[in-house]
Amino acid sequence: MYQLLLTTKYLTSRVIPLIAVAAVGLCVALVIVVVSVMSGFLNMVQSSGRTLMGDVVITYGISGLPHYGGLITHLEDNENIFAATPIVDGWGLLRMPYPDSKAKQSETVQVWGIEPISFAKVTSFDKSLQWKTPTENQMEWLLFDAITENQDTLRRAMGDDEWEELVVIVNDASGALNYESVMLWERVQKILDDEQWSLVLSFDERLSNPDAIFQQGLSLSQNGSEGIVSGLHVSEGNERQKDGSYRVVRNDYWWLPRYDATLTMLPVDAGGGVIEPESIIMPFVNEFQSGVFMIDESRVFVPINIAQQLLHLDQAEIVDENDPTEILGIDPAKATSILVRGIPGTSADDLQIIVEQLYDEFVSSLPLHTLVLPPSRSNPGLTIHTWEEQQRSFTGPVEKERELMRTLFSIVYLVVAALILSIFWSIVFEKTRDIGILRSMGASRGSIVWIFLQYSLVIGIIGSSLGLLVGWLITKNINSIHDAMGNPPLGIAVGSFALAFVVAVYTVSKAKSGQMLPIVLGGLGLVVFCGIGALVLFIKSVGGLIIWDASVYYFSIIPNEVDWPSSLVTVCGAILFCLIGAVIPAAKAADTDPVKALRHE
């Protein structure tokens, strides 16, 4: 019983144990935050990869898989497969609508030709679309475009006075809309009759049905024309805001669904030779955000038939090499990859085995006289990988980095042990007389050891618990903390300098007594508060500070989920090393000679 009483007394009677608790807590919080961010980064890569490519991927390079439609049907007939979708993957140049000059900018993009309906089943394509409905500014720009692009048709339906008034309104809007709303809808509708207004709305489906932009994105079409869905970071017109949302520059002037783009791709023949580039003009119908910066800055989606045409993977006639007028058969359209999604509960590894078996069955089921056959699985160009294997080249190094960070930060355990050892060594020296009294009253060496082990155990539990709480709070709010650090309120600088002034006054008043401790503490306080204030002013002067750069870390936000298994290991490790650090001082205390201890001054 007396061990518990002494432990409580030692904990509550001095400041040193509180310093030990704080130190243990900070060490634990540090490890939890760092490991959680690294684990979160890896998890985001893996989850995004699975979301974007399904569970299993069949790939056959630039040559493409023939008869992919039949293969997909055969795959989907299996009860373990939920859906499969073909992909035509290639690289191209996308001619953007900006700048305002005739010389337009081009972006190198990864082009995915997809079948929208089946692609949405395998992936979360519908959830990734950025524009569910246009904003008020975007609706004004759509109306402006509809009028200016169809002015001849509209002119024939209007009288001279009405037309002149409309021209004035549109000309005023052409400049002002770059900066603010001009109430274009109300002003135009006011001068048009119902028939004329219906004519204007007929120019663009999105004018009468704003939600159509989402459906157009899902179908990759707009007003009867096939379209493009581009990654949100493909366009330089999209700016990310501090709250994680996006704003289109110039008051939505460079909103991509207003414009057309020219897509150019370089097809390759069966022998690996380069053919003449193929180009097509298509409208932007929407944009998508996967959350992976590397994908959002380079990938665009187009209908699969467009990608097949541009890469010469569409259906074609097979002619006799000796007699070009003789047609031997049909070379079917091809897909470079097939994405497969399993039913819930089916692991990717199990699904991989099933897909391999189904692929072999399909190839063997084709008639022997088939002119163009899919490659056998012995072909080195054909791969059937799980989503983990498909992105192993990227996730593998990240996993190693996470383990390296865990190893490096395990040094914190040694810091905890050394800290407890030094603190307890000083406590043993200070409590020598108390130990002598206990030993003279019959306390065994084991009882003395247990007192200090209890002491360290309580410090470890309290410190680790506080560290876990602090680590959880920081990790969950790390994006808000990052934004606050990047653009701190000016009030922090004012408050810091005010506190520095108070500390300076206190230090000067205490310095008159000749005491050194107030002077040292005051000097440190001045340095800290003045440093904080100066740092805030510096960040303000440079326009903000970005620590987590999405272009470097691939994701637009910092992972903010706590890695609970690693956190619990960290907590248990800190408690264990607290006990290890206390063992040596506890043994020294147990070996204290009671006679010498009672004589200790």
Image (cartoon, grey):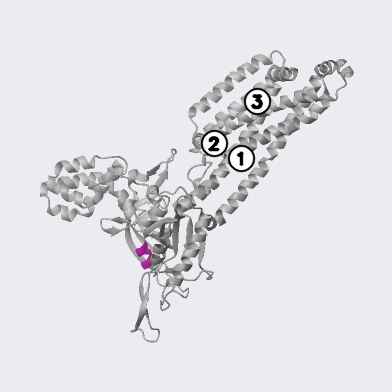
The local secondary structure at tag 1 comes to helix
Amino acid type of the residue tagged 1 in the rendering: Ser
Q: Earlier in the sequence, mark 1 or mark 3?
A: 3
Where does residue 493 sit, x and y in percent of width and height?
A: 52, 27
Q: Which residue ends up furthest to the bottom in the rendered image? A: 322
Q: Which mark is residue 475?
A: 2
Q: Nearer the viewer, residue 282 or 106?
A: 282
Q: Is residue 330 left or right of residue 391?
A: left
Amino acid type of the residue tagged 3 in the rendering: Leu
Q: Earlier in the sequence, mark 2 or mark 3?
A: 2
Q: Nearer the viewer, residue 205 or 98?
A: 205
| Residue at (64, 44) in percent of width and height | 405
Q: Is residue 279 left or right of residue 588?
A: left
**Where does the N terminus fall, quadrant-wise?**
top right
The mark closer to the camera, 1 or 3, is 1
The local secondary structure at tag 2 comes to helix
Span of residues in magenta: 304-309
Instruction: Name the dominant secondary structure of the magenta segment.
Output: helix
Residue that carries the numbered disc 1 in the rendered image:
566
The mark closer to the camera, 2 or 1, is 1
Q: Nearer the viewer, residue 165 or 248?
A: 248
Q: Rounded to the nearest whole Å, what is the CA distance between mark 2 and mark 3?
A: 29 Å
